Amino acid sequence: MAQPILQTDFPTLKLAGRGKVRDIYDLGTALLIVTTDRISAFDVIMNEGIPDKGAVLNQISAFWFHQMEEIVPNHIISTDVKDFPAQCQPYADILTDRSMLVKKAKPLPAECIVRGYLSGSGWKDYQATGSICGIALPAGLLESDRLPEPIFTPSTKAELGTHDENISFDTMAALCGRELAGKVRDVTLKIYAKARDIADAKGIIIADTKFEYGIYNDELIIIDECMTPDSSRFWPKDSYRPGGAQPSFDKQFLRDYLETLDWNKTAPAPPLPQEIVTKTGDKYREALFRLTGIRL
C-alpha cells in the first residue's frame, strides 16, 4: 500500500488554498482540486493520513456527480489527467485517481445538509428540543430511526479550525435569497431521494449527507464533493438496528475512537494507532467498492 499523501506541493502551479482534505490550485480559467489522504474529525485535521482515502473520495464523488446530472449540473470538467492542461502533466502520477479539473464557481455561503435518519448532531438536537434546526419531529423516535420524510437542515460554512453551526431555512434565505434557497432545498432533497434508492440497492443506507453549491454562468451547480464517506453517514443495510449508533463505512468509526480519549477536540490532534488508521481505510475502500464496483 502506498504511503498516504498528506499535502501536495506543485511549484509550477498557483496554490489557491488548502481545506481540511483538498488542495486547490488556480489554473486561470479553471481550478484543479486534489483530494489528499488527510482526515479530519471534529474539525481538527489528524496528523496521520489514511492511505487511498483521496482516491476513494474523488472516485465516489465522480460517480455521484454523474448520477445526478439530470437533477443539477456539477462543476466537473474532467477527472482524466490526460485532459488536464499541460502544466499539470508533470504531476500526473500524483494526480491520477485523486483529482478533478473543475469550473470556477462562486460558492454559496451555506452548507446544505439533508437528513433521512436521526443521528449525530441531529440526534442530540432532537433529544434536547424534539426538533432539528427548528423542524419539529414526532415524539418517541430512537437514535438512528428513519425519519418520516427527509429534512433539509443547512449550516454555516465555518472557517478552517472552527465548527459549522446549524441554521434555519429562514437564516439561509437571508444569506442567499429566498428563491435561491428554496431551489437549493428542493434540489438537495431530490438528489438525496435518488441517491438513497441507488445506495439501498447496493446494501448501503445513506443516513445523512452534506452538499455545497455554487453559481456558474448564472446557473446553480453542485461543487466540492458529493456523498462521500467524509460528507455522509453510510451504514451497512444488513446490520441496521435502530436504537443506538450504527456500524458505518465512514469516519464515524474514527470519531467513535476519539470519543474514548481524554481529548478536548481542539488542535493538536492526538496520535492515531495504526489499527485505527488501517480500519478506517478499509471502511472507505469498502464504500467505494459497494457503490461503484471499483476495488483499490
Image (spheres, rainbow, N blue to C red):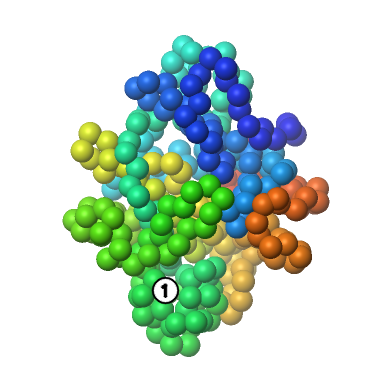
- Please name whichever residue, 195 or 216, is drawn nearer the observer in this view of the structure: 216
| Residue 241 seen | yes
The residue sitting at 57% across, 17% down in the picture is 11
Q: Residue at x 56, y 44 (%)?
A: 20
Rendered position, 237 above or below 267: below
Please name the residue shown 60% across and 57% down the image.
42
274 sits to left or right of 125: right
From the viewer's perspective, is 196 left or right of 119?
A: left
Q: Residues within 10 Å of mark 1 (few under 14, many from 20)?
A: many
Reply above or below: 143 against 95.
Answer: below
**Looking at numbered disc 1 in the image, what kind of residue is underneath it?**
Ile
Expressed as whole percent of the image width and height from the top left, the position of residue 114 reads 40, 62
Which of the two residues, 242 or 139, is positioned nearer the viewer here?
Answer: 139
Residue 81, horizontal then vertical, whole percent = 50, 21
Give coordinates of residue 138: x percent, y percent. Answer: 40, 84
Q: How many marks?
A: 1
Q: Quadrant of residue 266?
A: bottom right
Quadrant that contains the C terminus: top right
Q: Which residue is mark 1?
A: 132
Residue at horizontal 32 percent and vertical 36 percent from the top: 105
Q: Residue 142 location, x and y as percent?
A: 53, 81
Q: Is residue 138 left or right of residue 12?
A: left
Q: Is residue 12 left or right of residue 198?
A: right
Q: Is residue 32 visible?
A: no
65 or 267: which is nearer to us? 267
Q: The N terminus appears in which quarter of the rendering?
A: top right
Direction bottom: furthest residue: 140
Q: Looking at this rendering, what residue extends furthest in the left direction?
A: 179
